[in-house]
Structure formats: structure tokens, C-alpha cells
Amino acid sequence: MRSSNPVFSRRGFSRDNGYAGFNTAPQAGGPAVGTQANPYAQGNQYAPQGGNPYAQNPYAQQYGQAAPPQAPAAPGRMTMDDVVSRSALTLGTVAVGAALAWALLPVSTTSYGLAIGSALIAFVLAMVQSFKRKASPALILGYAAFEGVFLGVFSEMFNSRWSGAPFQAVLGTMAVSGATLLVYRAGWIRVTARYARIGMAIALAFMAVLAVNLLLVVFGVAEDGGLRSFGPLGAIVGILAILLGAFFLTLDFKQIEDGIAYGAPREESWLAAFGLTMTLVWIYIEMLRLVAIFSSSD
């Protein structure tokens, strides 16, 4: 079972061990060539009858594989509008929670404790949702609300020392996500199973190194945060973390594209919003630290 958390492996729209649609053209009425059957084929009125219906897709000649088509919308099937609206609601909940925490919780030991508690609750809710087979809007919005409280206090803490850092981090997050989307849509990045495996191996190795670094800092072996210091080494690690966040965004985009092409149930749009929110939060936190590092060096 995969998680939507950027720290762990990704959870695709398929419920098996593969990523839906990697290196294949979606076949709504039966198995994709060389892969497992479409998990959303049952009862799909748009199931093609025989052959590859996407052979004339202009992207097929350009990239050597057929691109997922945009099937006609069917009742109960996920659409891009569903993904956009759920993502806006989830990210809006994060933003509202952050704004309230910033306005109502002044920087203090108490607010730090509340932030840590909120982060732990958000983590638990995220893990529960990640291991559920179906999306739970209550869990996802609950995660977003508590994550927002944590981000509000966290951002205010950084702003009190590096004025304007949160605003710059928001702009940086928007720039990274926008650039990643443009690169993905232009076809400069091909999200294949091999691409996902290599990226996940790098991400897991990165997290393992950070976990060891945290232990060294806790036991006093590494000083000033070790790899997460506010010096040049910390900046390099932060840039790597942001690049990993961009990698996870490409997986999110691919999952959304495949979910729509395969006729995924509408509730899957909540999982898409959940994954996007977690990835963007990851990028924002790393961007905030990076802005602080560069501000400290001035």
C-alpha cells in the first residue's frame, strides 16, 4: 500500500503494485497492452472495442508512446474540474488554518507546543488516510486544517526573524510548481515506471540520510543541525529537497492524468487533492528554510 506522503512511496490510482498507465495507453474496456487490467473498466460506457484507439494521437509519434486521452465525462467519473475544486478546497483549508494561527497565536513557547501538536495530529490523519482504500474528505480536510495551524506558527516564527520570508517562500513554491507543470505538459519529462522507481530510490535514500542526521543532532554528535544547518551545506540539502518535491509533483500530475483517462471514480479526486497538498506543503517548508538560509548569508 502506497502513501501520498512525499516521505513515503506514492499511491497511484491503480490498487495494485504498478502505476496506472505508465508506458501504456489506457484501455477502458480491458487490459492495457503489457500491463494489468484497467481498475475502472467495469461499467464504463466508453470502453473501446479492440485495437489501440490512441494510435493516431500526435503525442504517440513524438514521444514513442500513446498519451492518455481525455475521455468524455461520465456520471460518477473523475474530471479535471473535480480535481481543481477539491484541491482548491484542501489548499484553502490549509491557508485559512495558517492565517488564523498566525493572527491568533503570537510567537511563544505555548504556540510552539500547539504547532508541534498540530503537526503530529496532521501526520496521524495523513497516515490513516494513506492506508485507507477509499478517500475520506473529513480526514483530508482535517489534515489540511491541522497542517495549516502548524504552518501558520512555523511561518510566523520565520517571519519574526527573517521578515518577508513566508511571502518569498509562497512565491517560490508557486514558481516551482508552475515550472514543473509546464515542463510536464511540454513532455520534457516522461513519467515512466523506471523514472518513478529511480526517483523513489533517491527519495528514500535522502530521507534515510536525514533520519540519521537527526539522530546525530539529538545525541550531540552533529552540531548546528548537521546537514540541516543554516549554512552552505544546509542550502544544498534544501535545494535537493525542493527538487524531490518537484519529482513528486510530476507523479501527482501523472496520477491525475491517468485517473481521468481511466475513468476513475469521482471520489479519487480527493486523493489527488490530498497528494498535491502534501507535496506543496513539503516544497513550501523547504523553500521557507532556503529563503532563511540565503537571508542569513546577506
Image (cartoon, helix red, strand yellow):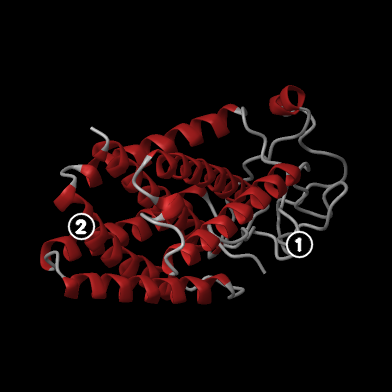
Depicted 256 relative to depicted 187: above or below: below
Image position of 21 (left or right of 253): right
Depicted 44 relative to depicted 138: above or below: above
The image quadrant that residue 142 belongs to is bottom left
Image position of 187 (left or right of 31): left
Q: Which residue is more in the foreground, 56 or 90?
A: 90
Q: Position of residue 137 (x, y in %)?
A: 44, 71
In this orientation, does residue 22 appear?
A: no
Q: Which residue is more in the foreground, 279 or 158?
A: 158
Please, what secondary structure does the residue beneath circle 1 have? loop
Nearer the viewer's eye, disc 1 or disc 2? 2
Q: Which residue is more in the foreground, 37 or 102?
A: 102
Please, what secondary structure does the residue beneath circle 2 have? helix
Q: Quadrant of the C terminus?
A: top left
Residue at image point 33% right, 47% down:
289
Residue at image point 49% right, 46% down:
241
Amino acid tagged 2? Met
Label 2, residues with CA under 10 Å away: few <14, some 14-19, many ≥20: many
Q: Earlier in the sequence, mark 1 or mark 2?
A: 1
Q: Which mark is residue 17?
A: 1
Q: Which residue is more in the foreground, 167 or 215?
A: 215
Q: Position of residue 115 (x, y in %)?
A: 27, 70
The image quadrant that residue 266 belongs to is bottom right
Q: Position of residue 295 (x, y in %)?
A: 24, 38
Image position of 271 (left or right of 19): left
Q: Quadrant of the N terminus?
A: bottom right
Label 1, residues with CA under 10 Å away: few <14, some 14-19, many ≥20: few
Residue under circle 2? 157
